[in-house]
Image (spheres, rainbow, N blue to C red):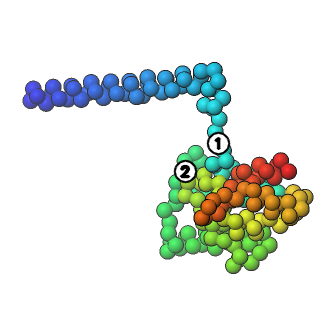
Amino acid sequence: MDNFFKQAWAGLRVLLALTVILGVLYPAVVWGVSRVPGLHGNAEAANTSLVAVVREGDKYFVPRPSAATLPASGGTNKSEINEDYTKVIAERRTEIAQREGVGEDQVPQDAVTASASGLDPHISPAYAEIQIPRVARASGLPVEKVKELVAAATEGTFTKTVNVTALNRALDAA
């Protein structure tokens, strides 16, 4: 029994030491380093082109739907055989087809299936393509100019994707 208490006391001391080191000292040092002149601006900056930023209005491209509820991210864990999920997909397909003025069979899969994290800023070129006429009409830009902006925001070697956040920023600049 004496050995048990020795081991328990040793474990408790290690737990307390690691809590102080990793839970207090390390975060304080990292925060302190981020305040060094010349580093502060970089420490506070976020690369928002890696995160889907949703903008309101028809003059912007729409990212994939999100399964996340802010501030958390995560998927719905529903599959194609879930009846509720199937209904949601059908509703999204109808809504997008009406908004973009295309047939439901022209709505790409990524337009109706949610991003698991809700943070993915990428859509397929097919989804961007069906949004071009609406965005051009609402923004007052020529269709060819909007197509150029889509091409500039298209990334990837094997699988092409369009970064909606970068594309919407380019629309604001145009």
N-terminal of the two: label 1 or label 2?
Answer: 1
Image quadrant of residue 65?
bottom right
Please tell me which residue is depicted at 55% across the width and 70% down the height of the picture. 84
Amino acid beneath label 1: Asn
Q: Which residue is mark 1?
A: 47
Mark 1, Cα crowd under 10 Å, few <14 / some 14-19 / many 20+, is few
Q: Looking at the image, which residue is at 85% across and 51% down?
A: 174
**What residue sits 48% from the left and 62% below the top?**
77
Question: Which residue is labeled 2 in the image?
Answer: 73
Q: Position of residue 18 (x, y in %)?
A: 34, 27
- Front residue (pair 153, 101): 153
Q: Nearer the viewer, residue 156 or 9?
A: 156
Q: Which percent across, then down, holds residue 12?
A: 26, 27
The answer to whether one can see residue 52 in this image is yes
x and y, in percent, of residue 153 in the image: 72, 56
- Closer to the observer: label 1 or label 2? 1
Q: Quadrant of the N terminus?
A: top left
Which element carries disc 2, helix, strand or loop? loop
> Would residue 93 appear left or right of 136 to someone viewing this image?
left
- What amino acid does circle 2 point to? Ser
Answer with left or right where residue 174 lies relative to residue 121.
Answer: right
Q: Relative to 154, is 95 above or below? A: below
Disc 1 is placed on an element classified as loop
Toward the viewer: 12 or 170? Answer: 170
Quadrant hosting residue 9: top left
